[in-house]
Image (spheres, grey):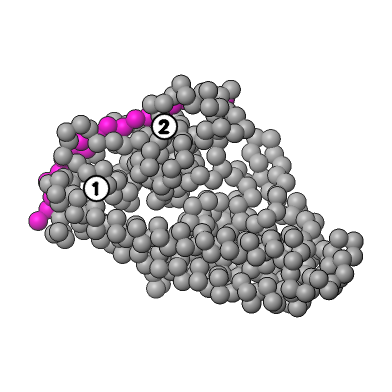
Amino acid sequence: MSNEMKILGDYIDILSGFAFKTKDFAVNGVPIIKIKNISPPTVSLDDLTYVSKEVAEKQNRFILSYDDVLIAMTGSHINQWASVVGRVARVKYLEKTLLNQRVGKVAIKKNAEADIDYVYYYLSQDAVKIELAAKAGGAANQANISPSHIKNLQFPCPSLDTQNRIANILSAYDDLIENNQKQIKLLEEAAQRLYKEWFVDLHFPGYEDTEIIDGVPEGWETASLSSVSVLKAGGDKPKVCSENKTDECQVPIFSNGISNKGLYGYTNKAVVEKESVTISARGTVGFVFLHRTPFVPIVRLISVTPKDDVMDVLYLYLNLSNQNFRATGAAQQQITVPLLKDKTILCPSVEVRKDFNDNMLPIFNQIDTLEKRMLFAQQARDRLLPKLMSGELEV
């Protein structure tokens, strides 16, 4: 039985963010949530902009709360899916943040028989983002929607009790995903701690009996990044054969995004076959991700692939994660391959490298397992979502 369609605006309000001025920005203080921080399924706290506490106190109306639903009212058209307009994310942190312009907060109207979780899942559907993008105005490389575009959507509106049941089914998958993300974060932190103990504090196994020569343990050396790895700038976007991984379309495409490693979609042929690291190279620069399966890096990314018998990918990833990258460009910050070539990297002895890799492999294998579980949960949720919304599956 199909669910009755209603006008979304009869059930929700949208608070548009505040237009903070450039002079309001500060080095630290209270973070503001911009378009770039809407990284589904959650709001990202990476690459934040701040305003002073004094400025923030004057805009209490725009303070965000845990579980708030935010929607990007500026973004790309559907040909750039990772940054498409209308993408939706939830606040999953307790820190005080403020809503910036062109980001909307979705709230249920007083006494309206609608569940905010249900509305969130409705808005997060690909079909809804496509519908909003089709209505968007703006230039060829920027799409804009208004609160009225969102409110004029027709959405399936079963009883409040049914909405609650649907939301509970879908949120069980998201809870599983969130728990896996927390476990991954703890494992990453454990790996970072061991890296810093061995290679920053130089408390590696046997350090007590190792002589330090010119600041480097005996048997170690410093080398240029280009001498221990192959550096390659990302190319043009290949044809995307699927938004999700399938048996026929398994090679992930990565862009410069900071959510889900910047996953853009899937294609059939890899560009980088070996385990590698990518560095975001333009706009938001210096984000480092590990890739242990073949993939395609596209523009705004630089792939760093370790050379055989010279460098290990897990050590390379952790080393680059702890580096500061010097960017150029006044209008837009960027990192280039020539800038990275001569960047120095500490190369431990073969014995220490092997010992460290043996310690790291169980950690990162567990991370891979958790990421696969997350992918299965996401795919299961996304298959269920339209069927539950339409009423094809009754609850």
Which tag is nearer the camera, tag 2 or tag 1? Answer: 2
- Count of labels in the image: 2
Up-down relation of residue 53 to residue 296 (above or below) = above
Left or right placement of residue 204 versus residue 65 in this view: right
Question: What residue is shown with label 2?
Answer: 63
> What type is the residue that disc 2 sits on?
Ile
Q: Quadrant of the N terminus?
A: bottom left
Q: Which numbered dot is residue 375?
A: none
Left or right placement of residue 27 versus residue 20 in this view: right
Looking at the picture, tell me which residue is in the foreground, 303 or 289.
Answer: 289
Magenta segment boundaries in residue numbering? 1-22
Q: Which numbered dot is residue 118?
A: 1
Gap in angstroms between the C-alphas marked 2 and 1 = 23 Å
Residue plotted at (52% across, 61% down): 186
Residue 223 in view of the camera: yes
Asked if the stretch drawn in magenta spans residue 8, the answer is yes
Element assignment for label 2: loop
- Residue placed furthest toward the right: 214
Residue plotted at (44% across, 30% down): 101
Q: Quadrant of the C terminus?
A: bottom left
Residue plotted at (65% across, 41% down): 333
Looking at the picture, tell me which residue is in the foreground, 39 or 203.
Answer: 203
Labels 2 and 1: the sequence-earlier one:
2
Element assignment for label 1: helix
Residue 80 point in image, percent of width and height: 46, 48
> What type is the residue that disc 1 sits on?
Tyr
Residue 304 in view of the camera: no
